[in-house]
């Protein structure tokens, strides 16, 4: 919006990640990134390895190159010990 003299008074940046990595909408429909992860293999090559979910970071990065720095994974099954992955 602008103030009385035509200068910007405030603004809001809406970056692609806000839309592409959005939570479920009011109808329960998942956002694009969540939809791409449903049913996909976590491991980018070979068998699924739930202890090394690097594939999640790769998929997230395809929507926004900076997102892999802020992706957190949660094991709802409790089968895997918590771990930290550094992607360089």
Image (spheres, grey):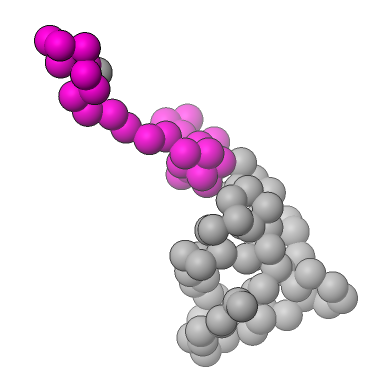
Question: Could one spot residue 76 in this view of the protein?
Answer: no
Position of 21 relative to 49 (above/below): above
Say which residue appears at 12% left-offset and 10% top-offset. 4
Say which residue appears at 62% left-offset and 65% top-offset. 57
Q: Quadrant of residue 11?
A: top left
- Front-most of 53 and 25? 53
Which span is picked out in magenta? Answer: 2-31
Question: Could one spot residue 77 in this view of the protein?
Answer: yes
Say which residue appears at 64% left-offset and 65% top-offset. 56
Q: Residue 65 appears at what percent x and percent y?
A: 60, 56
**Image side of residue 88 versus residue 67, left or right:** right
Pick the quarter of the image with the N terminus. top left
Instruction: Tell me if residue 14 is in the magenta stretch.
Output: yes
Say which residue appears at 53% left-offset and 39% top-offset. 16
Position of 20 relative to 42 (above/below): above
- Front-most of 45 and 48? 45
Pick the quarter of the image with the C terminus. bottom right
Q: Quadrant of residue 32?
A: top right
Magenta stretch secondary structure, dominant: loop
**Image side of residue 54 versus residue 20, left or right:** right
Q: Residue furthest left?
A: 4
Q: Residue furthest right?
A: 46
């Amino acid at each position: 919006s602008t103030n009385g003299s035509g200068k910007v008074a405030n603004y809001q940046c809406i970056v692609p990640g806000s839309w592409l990595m959005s939570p479920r909408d009011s109808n329960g429909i998942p956002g694009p990134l969540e939809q791409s992860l449903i049913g996909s293999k976590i491991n980018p090559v070979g068998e699924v390895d739930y202890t090394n979910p690097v594939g999640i970071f790769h998929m997230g990065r395809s929507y926004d190159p900076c997102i892999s720095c802020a992706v957190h994974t949660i094991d709802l099954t409790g089968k895997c010990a918590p771990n930290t992955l550094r992607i360089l």
